[in-house]
Image: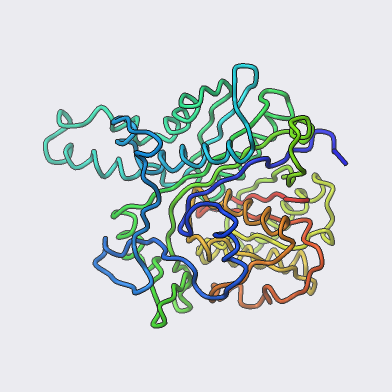
Amino acid sequence: MIETNSIVVSGKAFLSSIGELTEENMGRLYDTEEVIFDIVPQYDYLNLRCSRTKKVDKSNWKEFDSASSFRRLPNAYKFAIYVVEKALCNAKVNPDNDISVGVFFATGLSAISSVEKFYHPISVGGIEKGSPLLFPNTTSSVGCGLISLRYGFNGKSIAISNAGVSVLQSIDLAISSIQNNEIDYAIVVGTEELTETVYKAFYHTGMLGFGDDKGGIIPYNMKKNNTTVLGEGAAALILEKEQNMVNRGLLERTRVGNVELCNVDVNEKYASDICVDTIKRCLINNNISIEDIDFVVSSANGNYNLDKCEKDALIKLFGDNMPNIIFPSLYFGETDGASGALSIICAIDMIERNKCMKRPFNLNEHFQAIELNEKEVKNYKCALVLSSSYYGDFACTVVKK
């Protein structure tokens, strides 16, 4: 049954530590409890080694654009352009002048490699040694505009650089734009790249996860509660009205609900209550009850206070009826700008497969109190998706069959 104004994810794609979004790659998340990827971080930057860790050649960019100007773009922009192309193919969308497509570009660190590249000549030789590419290559709005220009999209183009929560914030804007008939399709793309500066910063602050003696990766150090594994890559979602998708003759796809947002001071005693209220508003606005939630996709980004706040909120919401909880950061690393889109893709995949992903390794101790992936669920129809950033931004939505 088609719901009035309901929005569906008609196309999706990612480029991550497990490679591209394929049936085979996603299937690995269900069939093993072992570490399944050779993940960034690239330990060579720190002169560190792990037997199961190596650099991943994510793509040969020359295969789809040999222009010298494109090759000079930051990896974050290249990742984004690549996954948008794949998502458009997945959605069977061929944009032309008769339809309006909006681009919503989500990042955290954005194109930090260009900052590194262009800062050194300026610091050594002065401003006259600076490159005119410094600002175009380091501004997220430029990455957003590049996607619109590359494919000839004529809808709105919006960039949000708010780290882990930026994809859900982008979805919030995208849904509103589609429902108000401002655009026909929305492309929400989250992207992130990692560099030597980032690795060293995380390493010296004790926030970088390392390999264990068995060749696995521990994303959270039980002694250092904020230790995490970094990831990079991009993920894209194509959003449109369900009626529009049906008119194009596509099979039923998964719906994404309205987003609720808030900002919390995670050091406050009642911070988790604010998250609870935000989730309740989300459920009410999407006509979903607590009992309808079959599983939760959690951000769990390694921030001590945010993770504790999120866990406390879930316990207050569900009590003894805690559903299964999935943590995409365990599979892809903490991908910051891309994390929200990866969470949505994981939720969609579980609903389509009607199956729960495995949990590959230990969690942050603040989630140990919750039994995970233990319950038998007959039908995975509805997921609560949570997202947060390091400075207290919190967002949630629902994904349903």
Q: Position of residue 120 (x, y in %)?
A: 19, 42
Q: Position of residue 18 (x, y in %)?
A: 48, 59
Name the residue: 62% across, 63% down: 309
Q: Quadrant of residue 62?
A: top left
Name the residue: 55% across, 73% down: 360
- Is residue 125 shown left or right of residue 90? left
Furthest-top residue in this view: 97
Furthest-left residue in this view: 125
Q: How many numbered marks appear?
A: 0
- Is residue 203 shown left or right of residue 129? right
Where is 257 relative to 367, above or below? above
Where is 244 relative to 59, above or below? above
Query: According to the image, what is the colour scheme of the structure?
Result: rainbow
- Is residue 377 shown left or right of residue 14? right
Q: Quadrant of the N terminus?
A: top right
- Considering depth in this image, is 315 or 359 the residue closer to the camera? 359
Where is 291 relative to 248, above or below? below
Name the residue: 37% across, 41% down: 61
Q: Quadrant of residue 27?
A: bottom right
- Is residue 157 shown left or right of residue 93? left
Q: Position of residue 251 (x, y in %)?
A: 76, 42
Q: Position of residue 115 (x, y in %)?
A: 29, 41
Where is 260 relative to 176, above or below? below
- Considering depth in this image, is 364 or 35 the residue closer to the camera? 35
Furthest-right residue in this view: 1
- Considering depth in this image, is 390 or 76 the residue closer to the camera? 76
- Considering depth in this image, is 241 or 365 the residue closer to the camera? 241
Name the residue: 18% across, 37% down: 122
